[in-house]
Amino acid sequence: MERVLVIGSSGQIGSELVLALRKKFGNVNVFATDIKNPPDEIRNGGPFQILDVLDYRNLLHFLVRHNITQVYNLAAVLSGNAEKIPLQAWDINMKALMNTLEAARQSDAKKLFWPSSIAVFGPTTPRHNTPQLTVMEPNTVYGISKLAGERWGEYYCHRYGIDFRSVRYPGLISYKTEPGGGTTDYAVEIYFEAIKKGSYECFVSADTALPMMFMDDAIENTLRLMDVGSDHLSLRSSYNMAGISFTAEELHQSIKKYLPNFSTTYKPDFRQAIADSWPASIDDSIAQKDWGMKTEYDLDKMTKVMLEKIGEQLNGPKN
Ligand code: SER
């Protein structure tokens, strides 16, 4: 019987992952925690508790008291926000991971999921079809912390037997909880603004291409990676995960197919430089081979669902 802890359950990934995990393991076996209040669906569907992952003693106590066997640690300061508070962001992102790794070592919570990101790559990395193993010189605080985290995860796996598993998420697109402070946030904001205002001012240029993934695909693949037997995993750092690559202009055009009057203007800010340092497309053949990574959504299919769901949230269900 698995007993699961999710750290960061009020965030963009956590608020959806908790629901999938509760379905899989049963509501009472999935403990949602965050330092922020969760959406109602999370609070009402099973145990929720305020828990600060930076408080090591409390975290360890929680794992032992609830007989936790696996942890999903999703707490992080994202790329855009991290550039505003570099030292603090480094401190938070690394301490959140190191506390979880150490607490795993000192308890029965031996299986750990921790998300990495396309941000581990940098301007010297090949930009197209970026391989799993390549030059990695990230130049953002967030990217540096993710790369360091991958190394620590692999180290704890080999040295202490922690079952560390990780993917390099592309930009994640979802309608339930918006992301906060990331560079790929434009690809979520654009859908909300399309429904609310019919126009969007985009903070990266029209030709900016980045890999993205619809949240349903991200959750499915996360569960897939966590389910597979250890002997399938040839990597214990973090797996490339490609998703779908498109430019901001292609995203705009996809929305226009459903909302012909939608308009976008482009006004790049400091996040343009971050986007330019990341890959435009990714090679995830090792993830496909090792644990069957696959996706269901292309750009237009995702756009259709995003617009429908956001429309329902803001205006009530269509009959
Ligand atoms: N989506 C994240 C960000 O933009 C990258 O992992 O910060």
Image: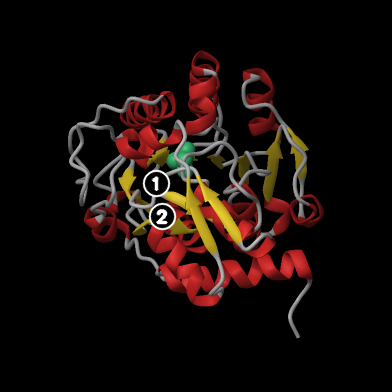
Neighbour tally class for label 2: few under 14, some 14-19, many 20 plus, Cα within 10 Å: many
- Percent across and percent down for residue 124 are 20, 31
- Percent across and percent down for residue 78 are 51, 34
| Number of callouts | 2
The residue where tag 1 is placed is: 205
Residue 248 — which label? 2
- Percent across and percent down for residue 177 are 65, 51
The residue under label 2 is which amino acid type? Ala
Residue drawn at 69 percent across, 60 percent down: 196
121 relative position to 79: left or right: left
- In this orientation, does residue 238 appear? yes
Q: Nearer the viewer, residue 252 or 216?
A: 252
Residue placed furthest toward the bottom: 319
Q: Dots 1 and 2: beta carbons under 8 Å?
A: yes
- Nearer the N terminus, badge 1 or badge 2? 1
The alpha-carbon separation of the residues under discs 1 and 2 comes to 7 Å
Is 274 drawn above or below residue 130 in the view shown? above
Q: Nearer the viewer, residue 242 or 32?
A: 242
> In what element is the residue under mark 2?
helix
The residue under label 1 is which amino acid type? Ser
63 relative position to 285: left or right: right
Residue drawn at 34 percent across, 61 percent down: 293
